[in-house]
Amino acid sequence: MEPAKISVWTPATLANINVGFDGLGCALSAPGETLIMHRNAHRGSVCIRSIEGANLPLETDMNVASVAAKSLLQTLGNPCGIDIDIIKEIKPGSGIGSSAASAAGAVFALNELLDAGLRPDELLPFALDGEALASGSRHADNVAPALMGGLVLCPPEGAPMAIPIPSDWHLVILHPDCVIRTEEARQVLPLEVPFRDAADQARWMGVFMAACHRGDGMLAAFALEDLLAGPFRIPLIPHFDAVRRVALEHGARAGGISGSGPSTFWIARTQEECAQVASALKTLMKSVNMDFDVHQTRISHQGSRVIQ
Ligand code: ADP
């Protein structure tokens, strides 16, 4: 018999990764969000019952979790209704896929609750219906790795592709306590970029992909040049230049803006170096009187998963 309730956990995600604007993302081992879905007899009804850990809309049409779930429920013929409880560890507007975790978690949970048997790539369009509400566009660079886990390339056309994970990346994510909405961060981008920058960016993306396939994580880090979006978004990120300088001085090999910011990510080669970078960034944030969160994390093979 299908269960009456299911709990799922969905990871935060790091998108763009400097070289793959709107097309590259990876799942993180932490933080994440828990979504509990309950079945009821009101066919087609989708209700957000509670949200812990963030102040977000409960209205069905305003929350990415309910919009995504409703889209899938309809396609499955509205066999029941659902109530959703969300426990957020990922702050909305932080740039590590808060809305994507809700959208991915909701469709993953519904698929499991109804035993519908859809694969993660088949769930993606429904999750994107939800994510589009938050970001104003249907890009999958957060939602695809949230569902599938690992490092994922979303081509302009066709299904998302799993890419080998650079195994020696230890990540520090620094979230200065301010909100940059994805929609706002899109408005600072130019409509056109110089031909030379576009050509060089394609070459860096090529090096990154080759390095991932060769298992050379440090070459993959070396390739992380951001010539297209970074220069326009850096002014939005509080103290970015100081953060970069301190991270690199304390052992980070590379880094940049996480998604549309304000979080930044920094790549260290070992657990020890990762702890040093995290500690130096904490000291910096305190010295400039900025509230912040720091996560020491890794790329994770696992996307959304059932926890109960
Ligand atoms: P992030 O990259 O952290 O997801 P976005 O700007 O893309 O940031 O999304 C945050 C926006 O999405 C906020 O305006 C928030 O109110 C809205 N939103 C709606 N539902 C959710 C949800 N379940 N989780 C997170 N954000 C949500």
Image (cartoon, rainbow, N blue to C red):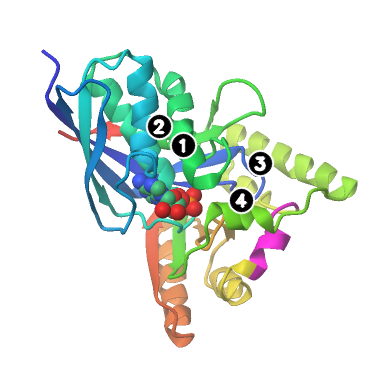
For the stretch drawn in magenta, the main secondary structure is helix
Q: How far apart are marks 4 and 2 (CA)?
A: 24 Å
**Residue to which mark 4 is pinned:** 221
Which badge, 3 or 4, is on the more N-terminal residue? 3
**Of callouts 4 and 2, which one flags the residue occurring earlier in the amino acid sequence?**
2
Tag 4: residue type? Answer: Ala
Up the image or down, 19 lies above or below 267; here it is above
Q: Please, what is the three-letter code of the amino acid marked with disc 3?
A: Phe
CB contact under 8 Å: marks 4 and 1: no
Secondary structure of the residue carrying tag 3 is: helix
Residue 63 — which label?
A: none
Give the mark nearer the N terminus: 1 vs 3.
1
Is any atom of residue 299 visible in this view? no
**On screen, residue 300 above or below 126:** below
Q: Which residue is drawn at 38% across and 59% down?
A: 296
For this view, does 169 lie left or right of residue 271?
A: right
Disc sitting over residue 147 in the figure: 2
The image quadrant of residue 160 is top right
Amino acid of disc 1: Val
Q: Would you identify the image quadrant in which residue 237 lies? A: bottom right
Asked whether residue 257 appears in the rendered view, the answer is yes
Quarter of the C terminus within the rendering: top left
- Say the numbered circle drawn on residue 208: 3
Which residue corresponds to the image point at 59% horizontal and 41% vertical from the top-left?
A: 216
